[in-house]
Image: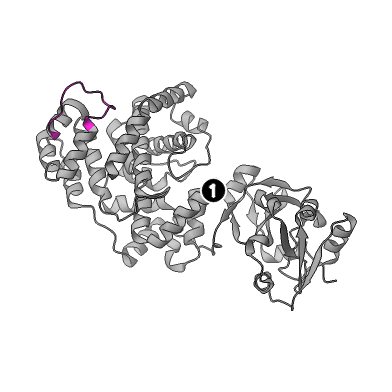
């Protein structure tokens, strides 16, 4: 019988029945898994994490990776992976690298991914380099009886190691390796017009009316029930002067024109249809937050509208990886987007720059497009909790809007956040949040209709 002594003693003492599957001696656990011929979803691994409070063993399927951000949220601890040498010292009766995912046999606290306990049978390391152990469902539950159960993993291909990069490094690599889309000419002309304090509604209307499709979308926007204008709107200039105002028309027109730089599928949870829905809701909330926080309403609207352009750039440059990210977002609703992006892009040295996240990528693009600094910052750091720095209130508005939208299932994040710290930093309270939610509920149908019209 080729089991590590402590594992064998534990299984015998607990009356846990198992099958010992003999293998030729293997160099590492990966090789043993491949040699077994079993589906990797049925093979368990032990990931060992540590902080000042001690070691935690996380048990999860071999074809998954831990979501470390979710681990922190669940445990309230900043756990870090053990080195292989540290782990081997804990399992002194095992061959190096062959750590049985039965932490109770080694006196360890265990956290098990919830899907493990639904398996009909599972294979796991025996602690030696020449066998695996098979447990049926009943005996697996006995072996993990003292474990805490939670959803802690990302499903999909394993991530490789990543090297930290500065944003300047990322920007340099992106420009060196890829042809980044320039801001479309019409969007650029609108941006330049907004920088001119003497620009008129007539000049803006003339620019927009160069594009019949954009003209139709602006008129549809002005005529929507969002604004309840009682009269007829026959021209873009009337939309500007009677309903929307110069800044709002300029910003929505610039957003619509800018999106044309990207070739991204409409379908999927990260596709263009859902992008527009998320962006319009976020812009709406940011504008209303600015009213309460003393910010510039039109600038806040633009921050919300354009904050997720990094996803479009990823979809445009890397369609295959974007499809994978889309699928993983569907399969892992509890995982953070940062963790999923690291999972998809971290295994390729060519793409390792993208592990900084779509927020940072979008901020780089906005900087290259010479958008306002607040827009650059809101896009670039909206994935960073506890951000402090330039244009902080606009970043917080976007983060709070996204936290609110998560509760509605809108956007690319679905794990709810605690809005209280964001509210406090903006000088708001729960009554402000309730009023914003009520206002959003009132116009949600109109925002959905508008989002559909922008992708039609």
Residue shown at the point (75%, 48%) measured from the top left: 147
The majority secondary structure of the magenta stretch comes to loop
Q: Position of residue 146 (x, y in %)?
A: 78, 47
Q: Residues within 10 Å of mark 1 (few under 14, many from 20)?
A: many
Quadrant in which the N terminus appears = bottom right
Element type where label 1 sits in the image: loop
Comparing 430 with 448, the one in front is: 448
Where on the picture, by quarter, is residue 44? bottom right
In the image, taking residue 23 as reference, residue 206 lies left or right, namely left
Q: Which residue: 9% across, 35% down?
A: 202
Q: Which residue reaches farthest right?
A: 13
- Residue closest to the eye, 217 or 384: 217
Q: Is residue 51 visible?
A: no
Residue 225 visible: yes
Q: Say if the magenta span includes residue 230.
A: yes
Q: How many marks?
A: 1
Give percent across and percent down for residue 117.
Answer: 71, 51
- The residue labelled by disc 1 is 335
Residue at image position (48%, 59%) is 344
Where is residue 416 drawn, in percent x and y? 53, 38
Outermost residue toward the bottom in this view: 24
Tell me residue 85's x, y (percent): 70, 66
The quadrant in which the C terminus is found is top left
Q: Is residue 87 above or below residue 196?
A: below
- Against 342, residue 227 (above or below) is above
Q: Residue furthest front?
A: 120
From the viewer's perspective, tell me whether residue 327 is left or right of residue 299.
right
Magenta stretch encompasses residue 180: no
The answer to whether 100 appears left or right of 444 in the picture is right
Residue 94 vs 368, above or below: the answer is below
Q: Which residues are magenta?
A: 222-236
């Amino acid at each position: 019988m080729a089991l590590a002594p402590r594992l064998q003693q534990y299984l015998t003492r607990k009356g846990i029945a198992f099958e010992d599957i003999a293998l030729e001696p293997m160099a590492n656990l990966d090789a043993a898994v491949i040699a077994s011929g079993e589906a990797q979803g049925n093979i368990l691994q032990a990931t060992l994490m540590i902080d000042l409070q001690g070691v935690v063993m996380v048990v999860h399927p071999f074809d998954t990776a831990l979501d470390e951000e979710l681990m922190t949220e669940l445990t309230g601890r900043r756990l870090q992976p053990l080195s292989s040498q540290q782990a081997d010292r804990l399992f002194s009766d095992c061959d190096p690298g062959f750590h049985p995912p039965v932490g109770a046999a080694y006196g360890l606290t265990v956290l098990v991914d919830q899907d493990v306990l639904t398996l009909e049978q599972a294979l796991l390391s025996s602690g030696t380099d020449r066998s695996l152990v098979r447990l049926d469902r009943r005996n697996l539950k006995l072996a993990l009886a003292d474990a805490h159960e939670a959803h802690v993993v990302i499903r999909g291909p394993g991530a490789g190691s990543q090297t930290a990069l500065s944003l300047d490094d990322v920007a340099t690599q992106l420009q060196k390796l890829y042809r980044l889309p320039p801001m479309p000419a019409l969007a650029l002309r609108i941006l330049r017009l907004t920088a001119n304090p003497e620009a008129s509604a007539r000049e803006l209307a003339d620019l927009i009316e160069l594009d019949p499709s954009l003209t139709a979308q602006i008129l549809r926007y002005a005529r929507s029930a969002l604004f309840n204008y009682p009269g007829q709107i026959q021209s873009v200039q009337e939309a500007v002067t009677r309903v929307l105002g110069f800044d709002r028309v300029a910003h929505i027109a610039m957003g619509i024109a800018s999106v044309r730089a990207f070739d991204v599928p409409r379908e999927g949870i990260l596709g263009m249809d859902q992008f527009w829905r998320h962006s319009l809701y976020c812009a709406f909330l940011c504008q209303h937050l600015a009213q309460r926080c003393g910010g510039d309403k039109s600038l806040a609207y633009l921050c919300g509208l354009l904050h997720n352009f990094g996803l479009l750039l990823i979809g445009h440059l890397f369609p295959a990886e974007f499809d994978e990210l889309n699928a993983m977002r569907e399969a892992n609703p509890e995982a953070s987007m940062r963790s999923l992006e690291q999972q998809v892009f971290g295994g390729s040295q060519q793409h390792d720059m993208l592990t900084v996240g779509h927020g940072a990528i979008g901020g780089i693009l906005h900087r290259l497009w010479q958008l306002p600094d607040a827009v650059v910052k809101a896009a670039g750091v909206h994935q960073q909790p506890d951000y402090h720095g330039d244009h902080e209130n606009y970043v917080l508005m976007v983060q709070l809007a996204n936290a609110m939208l998560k509760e509605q299932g809108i956007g690319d994040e679905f794990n709810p956040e605690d809005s209280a710290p964001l509210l406090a930093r903006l000088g708001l309270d729960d009554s402000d949040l309730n009023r914003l939610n009520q206002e959003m509920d009132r116009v949600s149908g109109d925002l959905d209709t508008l989002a559909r019209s922008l992708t039609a």
